[in-house]
Image (cartoon, rainbow, N blue to C red):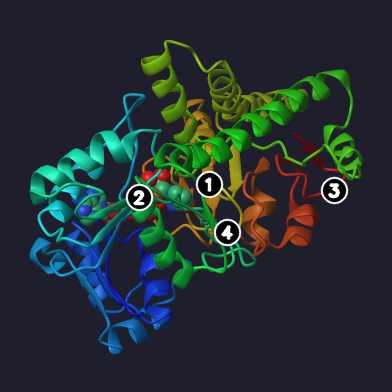
């Protein structure tokens, strides 16, 4: 049965969710406090790569999707899904966006409605932070009067194989009736739902998944640094280990981690563990330490290679390939490539960067954005491959560059060194 769905936050998570809800027949209000974003949505202009402007235009024309920045438009929902940011503020979880969203949603909660939180956060947020605000704002009781649950988002922007619909979705509720309500909504949205017994377990799922990635990436990054010093090819070792059909999962070294998840989510867990249980989550702290130092390691490697050729970084022209934190996306949030660029600039390098996906203006004062061309590649003292976008002409780069530091093991020329 089609429902009236309110999606709070129209970003990387909320906009694709709104489009999916629409595609399966629901009516959707997409509420966002960012007026500029709402204006663009209303014009049919998507700012999220996974949603095309033509899909958005069709959504608007259907008359079942309404983007808005007006809180009063939030009234009348049957299901409200909260997808607002959960950043760190001075290394501490900042839940102020969830709180602000909860006050807005809470004023419109009616008996029998359902509220689901999707933002990534530490265990306990749904029951200890969200429920009390919703109850105070609505004058109703969570569970008794309205349903409440948590369902972690698993989208992987730019992933052509696993999207919202075919990725199993973990669902939870604060009681059995809430779980049933949350599950029945997501059963309309995805191929498979995975119910867990409580919201705390569901909240932990997302942090576990991202901490697992973060720690394993740190493991191969640290190994890569040792292997380099030992004169062993880490990439060959990883590829060979990956032939083991059980008990091994491949992760690749790189210039560090970025995006909205890995640099942030594991710290939610370690902060919470320390506060609640008094125990340091040492794996997260170690992984942060290793991964945060990778941009510095990349710069050091580049300095050494220039040094070998009698050059200093100061005054050299360096071309960075890729600014996004992962291939084929335009997301440069917390990208290690930006840190590499900043550090090189600080050392006096003339930094140029190519990224056909990243549209946002980053570092324009200290980095020149250029297009990838034979002339550009031939004129620089070094090329550093940081994000292995499919769109790059790798044969041309290998043919024209005097020296390449490849942090992604994509290139194989005589002029190329790997991380
Ligand atoms: N981006 C991802 O790949 C990803 C994947 C899984 C989970 N998550 C999690 O999902 C949550 C949202 O992330 P995102 O990447 O979509 O963030 P985003 O910044 O792309 O979008 C969030 C949107 O919420 C809006 N917003 C902020 N406060 C609001 C309020 N009070 N009411 C209405 N709108 C408000 C912002 O203007 C913004 O448009 C975070 O907790 C994140 O950790 C993100």
Is residue 173 visible to us here?
yes
Disc 2 crowd rating (10 Å Cα; few below 14, some 14-19, many 20+) is: many
Helix or strand or loop: what does disc 1 sit on? strand
Quadrant in which residue 228 is drawn: top right
Q: Which residue is mark 1?
A: 352
Identity of the residue furthest to the bottom in this view: 61
In front of the other: label 2 or label 1?
2
Question: Whole-percent x and y of residue 325?
Answer: 54, 46
- The structure residue drawn at horizontal position 72% and vertical position 44%, both measured from the top left corner, is 408
Above or below, 133 against 64 in this view is above
Residue placed under numbered mark 4 in the picture: 168
Tell me the CA gap for discs 2 and 3.
50 Å
For marks 3 and 1 on the same chain, the one whose residue lies earlier in the sequence: 1
Disc 3 to disc 1, C-alpha distance: 22 Å
Which residue corresponds to mark 3? 412
Q: Secondary structure at mark 2?
A: strand
Labels 4, 2: front one: 2
């Amino acid at each position: 049965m089609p429902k009236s769905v309110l999606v709070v936050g129209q970003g990387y998570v909320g906009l694709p969710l709104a489009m999916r809800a629409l595609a399966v027949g629901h009516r959707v209000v997409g509420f966002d406090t960012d007026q500029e974003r709402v204006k663009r949505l209303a014009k049919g202009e998507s700012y999220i790569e996974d949603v095309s402007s033509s899909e958005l235009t069709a959504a608007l024309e259907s008359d079942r999707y309404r983007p808005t920045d007006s809180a009063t438009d939030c009234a009348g929902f049957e299901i409200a899904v909260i997808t607002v940011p959960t950043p760190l503020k001075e290394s501490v979880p900042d839940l102020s966006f969830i709180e602000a969203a909860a006050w807005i949603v809470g004023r419109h909660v009616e008996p029998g409605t359902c509220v689901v939180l999707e933002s990534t956060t530490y265990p306990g947020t749904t029951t200890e932070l969200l429920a009390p605000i919703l109850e105070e704002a609505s004058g109703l009781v969570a569970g008794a009067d309205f349903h409440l649950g948590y369902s972690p988002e698993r989208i992987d922007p730019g992933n052509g194989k696993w999207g919202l619909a075919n990725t199993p979705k973990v669902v939870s509720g604060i009681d059995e009736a809430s779980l049933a309500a949350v599950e029945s909504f997501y059963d309309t949205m995805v191929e498979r739902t995975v119910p867990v017994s409580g919201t705390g377990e569901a909240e932990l799922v997302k942090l576990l998944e991202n901490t697992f990635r973060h720690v394993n990436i740190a493991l191969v990054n640290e190994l890569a640094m040792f292997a380099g010093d030992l004169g062993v090819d880490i990439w060959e070792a990883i590829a060979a280990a990956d032939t083991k059909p059980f008990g091994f999962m491949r992760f690749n070294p790189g210039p560090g981690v970025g995006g909205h998840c890995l640099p942030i989510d594991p710290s939610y867990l370690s902060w919470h563990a320390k506060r609640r249980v008094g125990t340091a989550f040492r794996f997260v702290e170690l992984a942060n330490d290793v991964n945060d130092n990778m941009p510095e390691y990349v710069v050091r490697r580049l300095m050494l290679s220039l040094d070998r050729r009698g050059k200093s970084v100061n005054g050299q022209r360096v071309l960075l390939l890729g600014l996004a934190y992962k291939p084929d996306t335009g997301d440069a949030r917390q990208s290690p490539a930006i840190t590499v660029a900043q550090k090189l600039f600080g050392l006096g390098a003339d930094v140029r960067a190519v990224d056909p996906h990243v549209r946002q203006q980053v570092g324009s004062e200290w980095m020149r954005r250029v297009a990838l061309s034979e002339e550009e590649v031939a004129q620089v003292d070094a090329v550093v491959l940081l994000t292995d976008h499919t769109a790059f002409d790798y044969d041309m780069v290998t043919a024209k560059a005097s020296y390449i530091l490849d942090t992604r093991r994509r290139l194989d020329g005589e002029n190329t060194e790997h991380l």
